[in-house]
Image (spheres, helix red, strand yellow):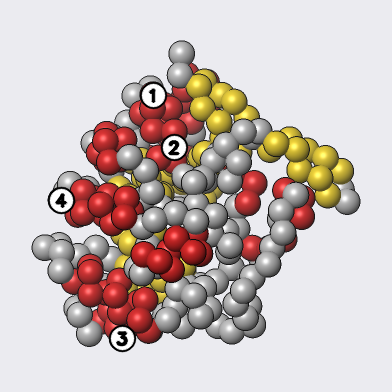
Amino acid sequence: MCNGTIFDIKEFAIQDGPGIRTTVFLKGCPLRCPWCHNPEGLNPEPETLRSPAGERTVGERISAERLAERLNRQIPILNRAEGGITFSGGEPLLQADFILAVRARLAPVHVLLDTSGYGGTEDFARLLAAVDQVYFDLKLMDGDAHRRVTGVDNGPILANLATLAAAGVAWTVRVPLVPGVTDTADNLERIAALLATLPHPPPVHLLPYNRAAGGKYAACGREFRPAWDEALPGNPRLELFHSRHLEAILV
């Protein structure tokens, strides 16, 4: 029996892939992006969140069989809505075996992997063979800045991006626009330059900064301490992508 840990299942999601979807949020992430809007997904273990409203446990250990059974009940509706199942997080690559075990038990349905790209190349390749589409985050191209801001090196992410580009799976790059951090002209230009070198460049979704990100941190026993000005609007700099004939939109 293969077990995993999830922290939420969102039904009728419309921003996690094509159509209407059910999104499974897997618990645990190796990155520590200071703008993360799901801090309850960072710790891989179930935890207690405390707020003025009381305490609640976030994180559920669940078998692949049980999760697949729950998702299969929704698949007829999802298929009629031209949607599907999205595996997100946290970071789903940390639970590759669990996702594959769930996927093997699902009825026919469109499956999307929403990932930071940080994980083992072998695990990533196995997941690519089992899904229909990938949302792949790119945050910072400079290696030193990536380590300083997210806590991890971007080498594995760029290696997995190369694997994805050659895999033949539908994919989209997503870039969170954090004011003065990820939305700088230098960073976005470097992302655009890299993608333009690919034989089949993917669409690019530029994600506005989520100003509600800090609301959950205290309940998780964490501090939200943005080192950027949250009042500034994120700058998508679409012209940097369009000038390289890339399909890029602000979503």
Tell me the kind of residue under disc 4: Ala
Residue 120 visible (yes or no): yes
What residue did someone put label 1 on? 101
| Numbered mark located on residue 239 in the image | 3
Mark in the foreground, 4 or 1: 4
Question: Residue 49 vs residue 212: left or right?
Answer: right
Residue at position x 15%, y 51% in the image? 166
> CA separation, marks 4 and 1?
24 Å
Q: Are marks 2 and 4 in contact (CB under 8 Å)?
A: no
- Disc 1: CA contacts within 10 A as few (<14), some (14-19) or many (>=20): some
> CA separation, marks 3 and 2?
35 Å
What residue did someone put label 4 on? 166
Q: Are marks 3 and 1 in contact (CB under 8 Å)?
A: no
| Numbered mark located on residue 16 in the image | none
Residue 107 visible (yes or no): no
Residue at position x 62%, y 74% in the image? 227
Tell me the kind of residue under disc 1: Ala
- Disc 4: CA contacts within 10 A as few (<14), some (14-19) or many (>=20): few
Of mark 3 and mark 1, the one earlier in the sequence is 1
Mark in the foreground, 2 or 4: 2
Q: Are marks 2 and 1 in contact (CB under 8 Å)?
A: no
- Disc 3: CA contacts within 10 A as few (<14), some (14-19) or many (>=20): few
Mark in the foreground, 2 or 1: 2
> Where does the image place residue 214, in percent across and percent down from the top left?
68, 63
What residue did someone put label 2 on? 94
Of mark 4 and mark 3, the one earlier in the sequence is 4
> CA separation, marks 2 and 4?
22 Å
In the picture, the quarter occupied by the C terminus is: bottom left
